[in-house]
């Protein structure tokens, strides 16, 4: 894939979370936005962002299905993976967006450490999966 | 207006993920495969996102307030806690296993039954951590009494 495309896509991610900061002054982490939907009184901005993310993703899937694929996992693998992602991002207060983009851009020590940690355990998991 | 702008922000986010093919779990897993056939794509995407947001964050922070709220809310927590590291480690295992983090999973929720299942599991995982936090907080309050 073309490096320029990747850089443009990254800039779009930056603009997207930047837009959240400009409008509501908050850090946009997808895990915290998704968790917000579980709240008894969900914050309107979180619902709007999540809706835009899901709706636009669905629309793009209709036009470019070849840009999507499914993990090579059984149903139980998918459930275990999802549980770990949901649980882990909540107790560490962030995911690839919250820590990976927003926190690292602010030079937050917590986010830098979290990012190094999840890349390390992610890489170890892929490595172990490849050996098994 | 606020709703529309945030909806657009979400739309830009998923468009970027589709453009960079981060909605393909095998591509994300290939980024994590340092000892195998390493695909650096995600590094360019993340690097460019951090740079762009870094500039926006610094410029916007100098303005008096966000458009729709009375003040900016930036996390002030500086403590490196076991919780942070354990949580990030757990997330990484799920990420490495599936090649999906929350953003791409939500963007691709309609793409397959498997990803739909994955998103439901994410929400259950979050719900579990919320329940544990609530118990912990109750315990902390009780121990202070």
Image (spheres, coloured by chain):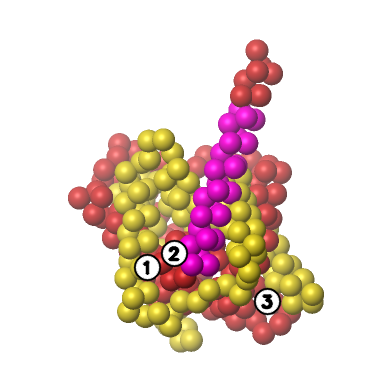
Q: Would you name the residue on which mark 3 appears?
A: B33
Q: Closest to the observer: B134 or B112?
A: B112
Chain ID for red:
B
Q: Is B17 a magenta residue?
A: no
Q: Secondary structure at mark 2?
A: loop
Q: Where the C terminus of chain A falls, by quadrant?
A: bottom right
Q: What is the chain identity of the residue bearing mark 1?
A: A
The numbered mark at residue B37 is none
- Pair 3/2: label in front: 2
Q: Closest to the observer: B113 or A39?
A: B113
Q: Would you name the residue on which mark 2 appears?
A: B109
Q: CA distance from mark 3 to mark 2?
A: 25 Å
The residue furthest left is B1
Indicate the position of residue A62 as horizontal and vertical percent values: 33, 76
**Which residue is pictured at 30% across the width and 40% down the height?**
B69
**Which residue is pictured at 36% across the width and 41% down the height?**
A43
Q: Colour of chain A?
A: yellow
Q: What is the chain identity of the residue bearing mark 2?
A: B
Q: Which residues are magenta?
A: B113-137
* Number of callouts: 3
The numbered mark at residue A57 is 1
Q: Is residue A101 left or right of residue A56?
A: right
């Amino acid at each position: 894939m073309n490096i320029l495309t990747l850089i443009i896509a990254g800039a779009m991610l930056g603009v997207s979370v930047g837009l959240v900061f400009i409008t509501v002054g908050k850090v946009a982490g997808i895990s915290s936005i998704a968790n917000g939907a579980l709240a008894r009184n969900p914050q309107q901005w979180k619902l709007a962002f999540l809706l835009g993310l899901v709706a636009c993703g669905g629309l793009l899937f209709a036009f470019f299905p070849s840009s999507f694929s499914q993990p090579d996992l059984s149903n139980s693998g998918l459930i275990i993976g999802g549980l770990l992602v949901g649980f882990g991002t909540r107790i560490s207060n962030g995911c690839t967006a919250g820590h990976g983009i927003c926190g690292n851009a602010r030079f937050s020590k917590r986010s830098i450490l979290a990012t190094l940690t999840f890349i390390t355990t992610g890489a170890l998991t892929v490595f172990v999966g490849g050996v098994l | 207006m606020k709703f529309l702008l945030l909806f657009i922000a979400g739309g830009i986010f998923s468009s970027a993920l589709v453009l960079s093919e981060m909605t393909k779990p095998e591509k994300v897993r290939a980024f994590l495969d340092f000892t195998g056939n390493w695909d650096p794509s995600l590094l360019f995407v993340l690097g460019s996102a951090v740079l762009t947001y870094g500039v926006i964050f610094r410029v916007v922070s100098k303005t008096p307030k966000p458009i729709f709220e009375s003040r900016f809310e930036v996390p002030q927590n500086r403590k490196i806690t076991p919780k942070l590291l354990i949580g990030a480690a757990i997330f990484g295992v799920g990420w490495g296993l599936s090649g999906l983090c929350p953003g791409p999973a939500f963007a691709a929720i309609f793409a397959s039954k498997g990803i739909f299942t994955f998103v439901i599991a994410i929400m259950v995982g979050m719900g579990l951590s919320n329940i544990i936090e609530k118990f912990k907080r109750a315990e902390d309050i009780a121990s202070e009494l």
